Image (cartoon, helix red, strand yellow):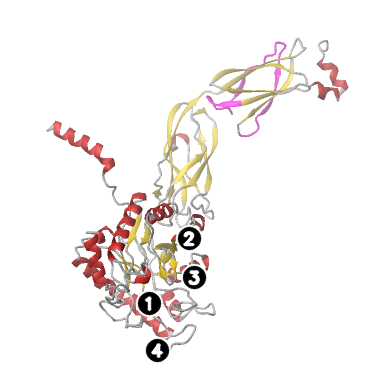
Amino acid sequence: MRKFLLFALLFFLFAMPFLNPVNAIVDPLVVPNNKFGIHIIQGTPDESSPSASLVNSSGGDWGYVTFLIESKDRDESKWQEFFNDLRRRHLIPIVRLATKPFNDYWERPYEGDQQAWADFLNSLNWPVKNRYVIVYNEPNHAKEWGNKVDAKSYAKVLDQTITALKNKNRDFFVLNAGFDASAPSKPPFFEDQLIYMQQMEETVPGIFNKLDGWSSHSYPNPDFAGSPDGTGRGSIRTWYWELQQLRALGVTKNLPIFITETGWKHAEGLNYDYRLPNQETVAGYFQKAFENSWVNERIVAVTPFLLSYQQTPFDHFSFKNTNSDYYAMYQTIQNLPKVGGKPIQQISAELTKGEVYSSIVAGEIYNISLNFKNTGQSIWNDGMQVKLAPLLGGEDLGINAVELPKNTKIEPGQDYNFNIQLRAPQKGTFKVVLNLFSGNTQFESNPTEFITEVKQPVILQILSSLKWKKTAQGEYILKVSGVAGDSTRKITLDSNGKSQELEARYLLPDYAFDFTLEKTNYHPMTIHQTVKSGLNVLDFRILQPALLEALLHPEQFWQLLPFSN
């Protein structure tokens, strides 16, 4: 039995690196979640600012924004700055992948495009742990998929993209392309959503079980002007019909729902359309939908289409009008009560400079600067107070927690110096463990550890001689670099060129310093030496006369000569 257990353990340890890693994504519904969102076009503050005002209003925080990134626009610096802006405004991105438009349709992804997307998206520091990615758009429309519907092709691309993203980072939360549930079966231009999904499952069995969530385009049809009370396929409850179809296709996951497109056409636009409901009516539809149709606990986000679009064909969907004002539905949604979302973020740091010294002098007080870089996703002090605190050794060495000033915020990539004070006891060796906290929560990064030993002070004795002189007796100046405070002191050498023993409590035992000896009319001499606890002899050997400088002062020049005193 023991041999079997040993064999099983060895097998597990050997095989573990080759097993599929556990999903790192988190269920967005296990924490407070603000489902309100909006669909935007441009990745700029011009849209993120009004988006935040819309979805994070009335008690809300950390709402959602859906937007697309085209394959020709994989500009890391551009999108990182936008992600940073979303982080500051507490907006969670839902990124929809897009190819390139050609004539009046979108091209299909090229061979290897999935890896290019994985590399690019993984290069960005996302605002939250879950990295929500929608794999393209409405492929049961020919114009969205190379001008020809092809469920087999899309199924394979979806499968390859999921694999590429997950292999790169397990935090990618992958969603399907939202389908047009009202499309007819008219190949090669359109395909019925259910037929299309069945063909996908036949091509890549289990493809829908590979998803992390379900993206739904739950539009109120017909003509995007249906009743907010509508149910079933082609309504604002299309998402529920889609779940039933997924179950029939063998999906066992309880996929979270992301309604990434929805909304009504309104009469207002470039030209008033009397056949459509006006903005006040549509505002009432949205209120009814959020209060009734979209309250299901599986719905993570609802991002209506569209915040701002001032041209056809989407001007009648736009929340913003041509006068840079907003239609009634903006104010209505803004006033609806919301939840303060608390999405999971990686909170981590890296010590980039500074240390708790490995040896210190008994009874001394040390002011130590430790520089930490924000390597996580959160902004330090954005809500919870951040502090550096001892986990071990603090009581023995008198180390107290140090808070980041309340008005100071440190974004990812930035750093901050925490200044701690340490008081050395009379003896002992101590382990010091420090970590950063956000409120009462420790950072995810490994704590910072040091070992320090209390030692007796460094004692210095200076040796030197003067060229052409029989004696080096007189006053000198000793300077030490690399120590805090004033490290300059006057010393006296006797006729043998030797100083008294000088206690130097400001020096750290077992550390190296630059020592410089100076005397008037002589060139200074610098030596680099590691000092230890107890007596240390600093031998500066022979100081050379500064003849050129002395010639400018004839009255001093004679003092350099051998026969002078």
Viewer-proximal residue, 369 or 547? 547
Question: Which residue is tagged 4?
Answer: 275
Q: Which mark is residue 73?
A: 2
As measured in the structure, the alpha-carbon distance from the residue carrying label 2 to the one carrying label 1 is 28 Å
- Kind of element beneath mark 3: helix
Q: Position of residue 29 (x, y in %)?
A: 31, 62
**What secondary structure prevails in the magenta region?**
loop
Q: Report the front residue among 213 and 531.
A: 213
Q: Of marks 2 and 1, which one's residue comes earlier in the chain?
A: 2
In the rendered structure, which amino acid carries the disc numbered 3? Pro
Residue annotated with mark 3: 50
Name the residue: 59% across, 26% down.
Answer: 513
- Would you call the spot at circle 2 few (<14 residues within 10 Å), some (14-19), or many (20 or more)? few
Earlier residue among tags 4 and 1: 1
Query: Are circles 4 and 1 on residues that touch, CB within 8 Å?
Result: no
User: Of tags 2 and 3, which is closer to the observer?
Assistant: 2
| Residue 138: x %, y % from top left | 34, 69
Q: Which of pointers 3 and 4 lies earlier in the amino acid sequence?
A: 3
Tag 1 residue:
263
Q: Position of residue 430 (x, y in %)?
A: 43, 31
Which stretch is magenta?
Answer: 484-513
How far apart marks 3 and 1 lie (CA) works out to: 18 Å
The Cα–Cα distance between marks 3 and 4, rounded to whole angstroms, is 29 Å
Q: Quadrant of residue 162?
A: bottom left
User: 9 or 539, which is in the foreground?
Assistant: 9
Q: CA distance from mark 2 to mark 3?
A: 23 Å
Mark 4–mark 1 Cα distance, whole angstroms, equals 16 Å
Which mark is in front, 2 or 1? 2
- Label 2: which secondary element: helix
In the rendered image, which quarter contains the N terminus? top left
Residue 406 drawn above or below residue 228: above
